[in-house]
Amino acid sequence: NNGNYEDMAATVTGTDLRAWGQKDLANDNAHLWVQNDEHTWYNIVNSNPMPPVSGTIEISGFQPGGSYSVDWWDTYEPVKANQIISTDPVSANGSGVITLTITNLATDIAAKISYSGTDITAPTPDPATWATVPYSTGTTSISMTATTASDPSGVEYLFDCTAGGGNDSGWQDSTTYEDTGLTPDTQYTYRVQARDKSANQNAGGWSTSESATTDATPDTTAPTPDPLTWATVPYSTGMTSISMTATTASDPSGVEYFFDCTAGGGNDSS
């Protein structure tokens, strides 16, 4: 012990997941042991069920935005050269907290956290791309979804309305944004950007700009005049024909006409 170690004081989520260890914040490293609480000699001897467990482990006190590596150790492997299962990058968030994710742990595992530098890299993909380009969701709203970006420090997104007078999202965790309170039948243009949650807040490039038009307000009014009138009432134009003309009607959505023969066995206009 170099005199710098202190209790890891981890925050653990997940039923039957336990973690103990020490951290050396002076040298930016930590060592921990993670156990499935159901994996005990008693349960092994008695052949009791020991379902795998999952959860997260949060450890505080590291450099905000710092980049670290995690060596995962197989505690049952006798050959030293084979004991490290994998090495994963991880970053402390803006508060200096490192979060480790445990998935389907059947027995136990050990880990060593080591400092590897400051996060200076923007999330990928860079520039950001669209999973779903902006599209109308009604007369006053448009929705859109960015491609999920990846970064060890975590990612947040900004949706920017560049034309039409819509609203920006502000930085948010969700990849989906719905702009509301818009004007019917109006085109709006958007782009999206991703940045990480490190202290440096490294931002990638803007996506392509894409446009969508809100739905028009539904037309619920019949054409005028209503009821319709005749410009020229029906009149004979020969032994086998009759002609007629309706008054020209008006409607913002355009107008079409139907002439109905109600007596005499003639033909409707179809």
Image: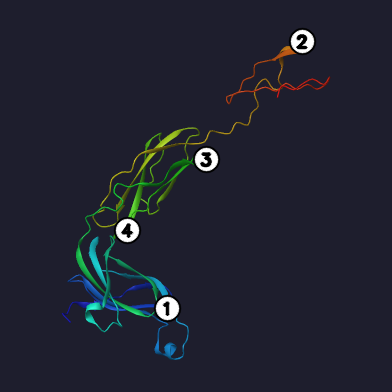
Residue for point 37% across, 80% down: 107
Label 2 crowd bin: few (<14), some (14–19), many (20+), radius 10 Å: few
Q: Which residue is mark 1?
A: 16
- Which residue was labeled with disc 3? 138
Give percent across and percent down for residue 93.
29, 61
Q: Are there few (<14), some (14-19), or many (20+) residues within 10 Å of tag 4?
A: many
Q: Are marks 1 and 3 in contact (CB under 8 Å)?
A: no
Query: Mark on residue 263?
Result: none
Q: Report if residue 192 is visible in the image.
A: yes
How dense is the environment of label 1, judged by Cα within 10 Å: few (below 14), some, or many (20 and up)? some
Report whether 1 appears left or right of 247: left
Q: Of callouts 1 and 4, which one flags the residue occurring earlier in the amino acid sequence?
A: 1
**Marks 3 and 4, Cα distance to the nearest angstrom?**
32 Å
Q: Earlier in the sequence, mark 3 or mark 4?
A: 3
- Of circles 1 and 2, which is in front? 2
The residues tagged by marks 1 and 4 sit, at their Cα atoms, a distance apart of 26 Å
For residue 235, the mark is 2
Helix, strand, or loop for circle 1? loop
Q: Nearer the viewer, residue 239 or 175?
A: 239
**Residue pictured at 45% horizontal, 81% vertical:** 50
For the N terminus, which image quadrant? bottom left
Q: How far across and how far down the image is residue 142, in percent? A: 46, 41
- Describe the element under mark 2 as helix, strand or loop: strand
Query: What residue does disc 4 label?
Result: 154
Q: Secondary structure at mark 4?
A: loop
- Given the image, on which type of amino acid does mark 4 rest? Gly
Q: Is residue 43 above or below residue 68?
A: below
Q: Residue at x 59, y 24 (%)?
A: 254
